[in-house]
Amino acid sequence: MKNVYTVIFCLFGFFIALTANGQDDQKRSIRLIFAGDVMGHSGQIVSAEVKTGELYDYTPCFQYVKPLVSDADLAIANLELTLPGKPPYTGYPQFKSPNELALALKDAGFDLLVTANNHSNDSYASGLINTLDVLDGYHFLHTGTFRNSDERLMYYPLLVYKNDFRIAFLNYTYGTNGIPTREPTIVNLIDVAQMEKDLAEAKSLKPDAIIVIMHWGLEYQLQQSTEQDFLTQKLFDGGADFIIGAHPHVVQPIKEVELERDGKKKKGLVVYSMGNYISSQTKTNTDGGIMVELTLEKDLSSKETILKEHTFIPIWRYIRTLENGKKEYLILTDNELEKPGLLTPDAKLKMESYFKRLRNHLANSDGIEKPISTESVDVK
């Protein structure tokens, strides 16, 4: 009888395994990673310069976060600068960076860049158009600014297909620093009526998720403004599932929300600001930020998509002085705190201080920190 029971048990186990596999076959997941403000201050331009006015290399900036970015199914960042395609390259107040910055972002693993922000018009209409030409040349997905109304009509909202998901992306900015948008180019501005129309259009396309990336809020303020809260509610009411914020240059809270979609309760998320990703800013709390990861899960049979997990990764910008006196801008995570020969004692203290403040700041929000286990690449 023992052998009979063994056979029955094995068959039962085989049936369970088949059932489990059948269920797994009906599930799909996608992991998205978002990064904050990619700036282009003059110090960064000088640091990246290899041949005066002709050749630049920004790849060292992203060498330590590249494994995290490239490992995601879809990596998104806010490109807060223009790529005019020729010198002079300048930092604040009108950001005009070499094309090689976009190339380095591509090398790091970024797939989608949003371009609607207060610096969209820093190189005027020709610079806006050249920025989009460069991004197309490097095969980036992008949204937020457009060469003309026909292009916006055709490609907005941006639909991204990946891992059996169809995700709609929208992107808006509060303004363009007083530099007018010259026809025929378009910069998506925050306008409640227009955003409601765009969200209705996005919903009609029946995506698995609608993600709105907002350039909003008050600079250097650690808490979101009442206007951000107002816009958040409008966006969720209009059909947004997730809202990711940029512009304040510091990290602001992360909040989970309960949404009703098609008569069902669903978890949504708003990240009010991810802070800086790479910049030359030195004001308190501007020397770092967070990357945000969203893992979505889709049931192929029911077509229902849920937020399975969301986490954040603290990052810190280190301005390292090389032996030849040249500066090097690096984005670091916890992994690099103990890396031999990388951080000076003073830099290590600053990095630890920033991470401590950041974690205390987010302690009462709904953010969940992701443990970092990715090995860093070697120091050049």
Image: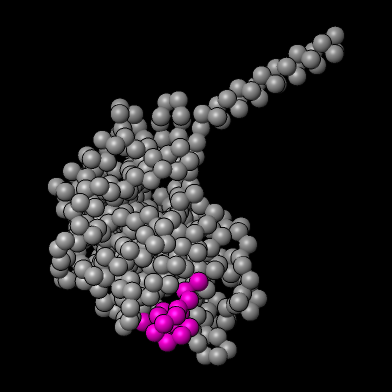
Viewer-side residue, 129 vs 16:
129
Q: Residue at x 41, y 29 (%)?
A: 303
Callout count: 0
In the rendered image, residue 98, in percent from the top left (x then y), is placed at 38, 75
- Residue 323: image quadrant is bottom right
In the displayed structure image, the side of residue 100 where residue 155 appears, left or right: left
Q: Residue at x 26, y 65 (%)?
A: 129
Residue found at the very far top of the displayed protein: 1
Q: Quadrant of the N terminus?
A: top right
In the displayed structure image, the side of residue 371 where residue 115 appears, left or right: left
In the rendered image, residue 46, in percent from the top left (x then y), is placed at 42, 84
Q: Tell me if I can see residue 16 in this picture.
A: yes
Q: Tell me if I can see residue 221 in this picture.
A: no
Vertical order, 75 against 182 (above or below): above
Color style of the picture? one colour
- Magenta stretch encompasses residue 53: yes
Viewer-side residue, 111 vs 194:
111
In the displayed structure image, the side of residue 227 where residue 286 appears, left or right: right
In the rendered image, residue 299, in percent from the top left (x then y), is placed at 46, 30
- Residue 144: image quadrant is bottom left
Q: Quadrant of the C terminus?
A: bottom right
- Magenta stretch encompasses residue 328: no
Q: Residue at x 16, y 61 (%)?
A: 184
Vertical order, 125 against 282 (above or below): above
Viewer-side residue, 215 vs 22:
22
Q: Residue at x 21, y 68 (%)?
A: 125
Residue found at the very far right of the displayed protein: 2
Vertical order, 216 against 268 (above or below): below
In the rendered image, residue 41, in percent from the top left (x then y), is placed at 36, 78
Residue stretch rendered in magenta on the structure: 42-59
